[in-house]
Image (cartoon, rainbow, N blue to C red):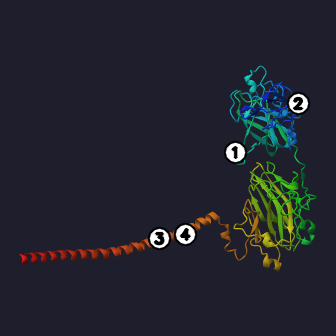
Amino acid sequence: TFKLEVSTNGEDWMIYRHGKNHKVFHANADATEVVLNRIPQPVLARFVRIRPQTWKTGIALRFELYGCQITDAPCSELQGMLSGLLPDSQISASSMRDIHGSMGAARLMASKSGWYPSPTQPIAGEEWLQVDLGVPKMVRGLITQGARGLEGSSSAENRAFVRKYKLAHSLNGKDWNYIMESKTGFAKIFEGNSHYDTPEVRRFDEIVTQHIRVFPERWSPAGIGMRLEILGCDLPEITTLPDTVTPTVPKVEQTTSAMRPATSPSLSAVCDFEKSLCGWSADPHSGVSWTLHTASSGSSGHGTHGTWQDLSLGSDNFSGNYLHLDAGSHTQRKKARLLSPEVGPERGPLCLLFYYQLQGEAQGSLRVLLRDNNQEDTPLWALKGDQGPHWREGRTILPQSPKEYQVVFEGFFDHPTRGHIRIDNIHMSNSIELEQCAQPLPALTSGIPNRKTVDLGNDPAFNHKQHINGGWPPFFSTPSSDLDPPSVTLVSEKDKDNAWLYTLDPILLTIIVMSSLGVLMGAVCAGLLLYCTCSYSGLSSRSSTTLENYNFELYDGIKHKVKINQQRCCSEA
């Protein structure tokens, strides 16, 4: 048997533990057999020692180590703390005990000491250690290590480390956000170190950030001591959509024939953004633009609705290109609009299909608008709030119009916190039946303000079947639930007067119905009670009179019998 010791510098050693006790490994029973021992919990180390515990005849050993580099994992490159690529000027802290020391002591595996805050009795959440990566990076993990102590310190002070900590991130170094626990909604508390020398790796969902700040929450009896390294990678190549579309305000002498012709081939095919943007472009008048991302995952992502390589229905695994909008201070309350090629007159009605992701706490919203040649937008479809990490399908009907128009995808964030909006596989189909593109749901589209009137001309065929009520097409796309893809609601002229019923909340409607039933049942019970009371009163009066008569007759009978008996008695005497 043997024990295992690990170290990062060859001087400070730790015996490997399994739980609270030292782990004893069982080795060989003869001189030739090969025995494989797996370490229950991988450990990060540079130096490894084997300490024989029991042996036969003498100690003899040959061995090999199995492991991997941290950087073998996806997006887990060391960001420069260990190597010195990041200068000391980009490392800062709330305070430092050694006023003459260098912030380079906070680097992972720094040979001398580590970062110690100035207070000997610090308060949880007030001290912090910060790293500036220089430019925004994709960050997925953190390596933390305790500190060895300052020059002249006692052996007890050599064992300082942080047991638990919180992690905050920022793009500008001013606005900070904690990494949150998805189940509780509170700041996540990470498990830190249990030994002052042995590093611990903690991974989390990828975040885009430039500044990382660690807030110690619990620490060793010797106090707070820390060294660290950050794991991440460069951001994927981002191509900003070219501002190729310059909307023109029509003059008096302009006609629809002067508009730019529609690009029919781009509209009839599925646009997955793999080879081109299919004629879609950014709105030059919006404050922020959608970006074209290339996913790094190797998943093929074959879904049940086709062989699109960049998404998989019900999953967040995808590879390929998609349009992306990230939440942040640069996008807060700014509308990012994506414009389609112009849809030609008299074309349609069409079924617009697309896939989207709407995720995060930034309260993002995604809308589909119809823009006419007067640059006026009419909302057709809207969705707001976190919809989870999966790709979902959206559908809405594009009406037939005698004039050219464009379809607009609009993304918007209420808050600068974490979140994103993604869209992919846009398809304007004329082969899908409108009933399939507009399945009834017990709710209307929510979150669409200010209904506008759309001038679609005097086409009798269009006005007969595809009439728009107050600027709204008769079909509205509405998300159904977290499990079912969003569908649509059918509202016709016949149901226009009863449309208010669809706006009632199901719970409110249930309360109204139950209250009505309660009032009705109460009235029935009150009537029955009144009837029974009256019936009982009449019966009681009759019974009382009969009883009195009976008693009276019985009384007279008794008197009569007494008199008869007296007469008999006297006659016999």
Image position, residue 227 (x, y; %): 80, 32
Local secondary structure at mark 1: loop
Residue under the image location 87 percent in, 31 percent down: 31
Q: Earlier in the sequence, mark 1 or mark 3?
A: 1
Residue under the image location 74 percent in, 56 percent down: 385
Q: Residues within 10 Å of mark 1 (few under 14, many from 20)?
A: few
Residue under the image location 90 percent in, 66 percent down: 269
Q: CA distance from mark 1 to mark 2?
A: 50 Å
User: Which quadrant of the view contains residue 536?
Assistant: bottom left
- Which residue has dot 2 on it? 62
Which mark, residue 525? 3
Q: Nearer the viewer, residue 485 or 127?
A: 485
Local secondary structure at mark 2: loop
Q: Earlier in the sequence, mark 2 or mark 4?
A: 2
- Amino acid at pointer 3: Cys
- Amino acid at pointer 2: Arg
- Which residue has dot 4 on it? 517
| Residue 416 vertical placement versus 540 (above, below) | above
Which is closer to the viewer, label 2 or label 4?
2
Q: Nearer the viewer, residue 404 or 114?
A: 114
**Do labels 3 and 4 touch, CB within 8 Å?**
no
Quadrant location, the N terminus: top right
Q: Earlier in the sequence, mark 1 or mark 2?
A: 2
- Which residue has dot 1 on it? 186
Q: CA distance from mark 3 to mark 4?
A: 12 Å
- Amino acid at pointer 1: Phe
Q: Residues within 10 Å of mark 4 (few under 14, many from 20)?
A: few
Local secondary structure at mark 3: helix
- Amino acid at pointer 4: Leu
